[in-house]
Amino acid sequence: MSHQSNLIADNIEQYLHEHENKDLLRFITCGSVDDGKSTLIGRMLHDSKMIFEDQLAAITQASKTSGTTGDTVDLALLVDGLQSEREQGITIDVAYRFFSTDKRKFIIADTPGHEQYTRNMATGASTASLAVILIDARYGVQTQTQRHSFIADLLGIQHLVIAVNKMDLVDFSEQRFNEIVEEYRAFATNLNAPDIRFVPMSALNGDNVVNPSEQTPWYYTAGYEGKTLIELLESVEITYDQNLTDLRLPVQYVNRPNLDFRGYCGTLAAGVLRPGQAVKVLPSGKTSRVERIATFEGDLTAAYPGQAITVTLDDEIDISRGDWLVSAEEELPLSNAFEADIVWMHEDALAPGKLYDFKLATRDLSGQVSAIDYQIDVNTLEKHATNSLSLNAIARCEVELTAAIPVDNYRSSPGTGSFIIVDRLNNVTVGAGMIRGVAKASDSGPEKTDWASFERDLNALVRKHFPHWEAKDIRQLL
């Protein structure tokens, strides 16, 4: 069954118009090693008629030397392009592929299953709205299944599709499928994802990937989802995942082409912006109103998350790169210290107290991880104390910067609630973080200075040793 539109041959202009207006779903495939992630993507591209003839010929030839499926074409080679990946039959780097159906456009990120490449999986998940988590029907929920589920949940992915793969190796057993569903649901009680679906399939043979399978008649009866994987991807509702309430526009560039125009350019991270709307600049707190929302195609009556825009204001106020435009009524905390979940991505361990560069939205600052509250064991979700973070470790940390910034929670606004950590010496990205809120005062940390008591004690000390001093002299000293 082809999911390619007939309009390509009949009316190409209408097809291009419809294609332009389709919504886009970004998703990742993840799971344990050899669960069939790359094969699944190859099968989706093949069965939805999104492989060119030269691509099919190339992987047919490569299957003879690097394939793992015998005499049949190894569809996993479509995404496992690195020589080392083909030699070992594993995914190392994140591979991105695009395809579309009549209903939606897709960008897939095929992420590695090996534990040592967890950082690559986190990179692919950072821009995804949905995660397809594969489980080998023979082995059920594995440690890496839990690891990837936790990371996807940590990065705010709200939709999970649990693809129970290789059902052909367990004779498409309904009982085995139900056992895995119950096993995963028990683990998922620790996750925040509100939408979890399950589908039995065989990526190698194409069962329930794009086309319904005759091998699972029980799946199309009452009590089951009854949709193929591609049908689940086409129907999942992602419109309301975006934050349309809290206005967030980080300023990337001040556009000043002539004396009569001053615009503030950036990509709207959250909320809806309209001309005439009252806005506030952070961190200065100055307020104004939106005069125009300019784009290359012309002025807009409203801007939505993801749109690159240029905003002009009614008032001439000081705004520069790194500032935010938010709603005038917004009470967003400003602080130079916050709590964050950090994924460490470098062989050199994170050392608390070491100075790093932090890139938050459009602003660059220096700072440090002042303390590690706890490290999370992603295999058991247990928390334990540590003094440093090694490669692929995840921990809740306290971060201190050299200047106060607006503090946004990552789950409500990922675009402004996330950051990367850069080594100041070699400019290498060594970590990524998700802000959880303003740092809480630590009971074990240094006590805050009581300035009222200090002033009182100093006043008494000065009067004792310098009785001839007048009150104005003491105030000048203070």
Image: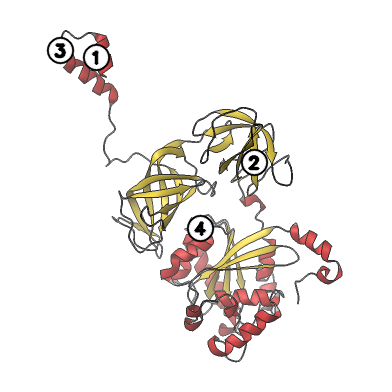
Is label 4 or label 3 in front? Answer: 3
Upstream in sequence: badge 2 or badge 1: 2
Q: Secondary structure at mark 4?
A: helix
Task: Name the residue that disc number 2 marks.
Answer: 310
Residue drawn at (50%, 69%) of the image: 183
Vertical order, 61 against 302 (above or below): below
Q: Position of residue 384 (x, y in %)?
A: 32, 57
Q: Amino acid at mark 4?
A: Asp
Vertical order, 402 against 450 (above or below): below
Task: Name the residue that disc number 3 marks.
Answer: 466
Q: Amino acid at mark 3?
A: Phe
Q: Residues within 10 Å of mark 2 (few under 14, many from 20)?
A: many
Q: Is residue 35 left or right of residue 289?
A: left
Task: Name the residue that disc number 4 marks.
Answer: 153
Residue drawn at (46%, 66%) of the image: 146
Task: Name the residue that disc number 1 marks.
Answer: 474
> Of 177 and 191, which appears nearest the observer?
191
Upstream in sequence: badge 1 or badge 3: 3
Q: Is residue 78 left or right of residue 354?
A: right
- Indicate the quadrant where residue 422 lies: bottom left
Q: Is residue 291 left or right of residue 354?
A: right
Quadrant the N terminus occupies: bottom right
CA separation, marks 3 and 2?
61 Å
Residue drawn at (50%, 61%) of the image: 123
Q: Residues within 10 Å of mark 1 (few under 14, many from 20)?
A: some
| Residue 188 visible to the viewer | no
CA separation, marks 1 and 4?
57 Å
CA separation, marks 4 and 3?
64 Å
Upstream in sequence: badge 3 or badge 2: 2
Upstream in sequence: badge 2 or badge 4: 4
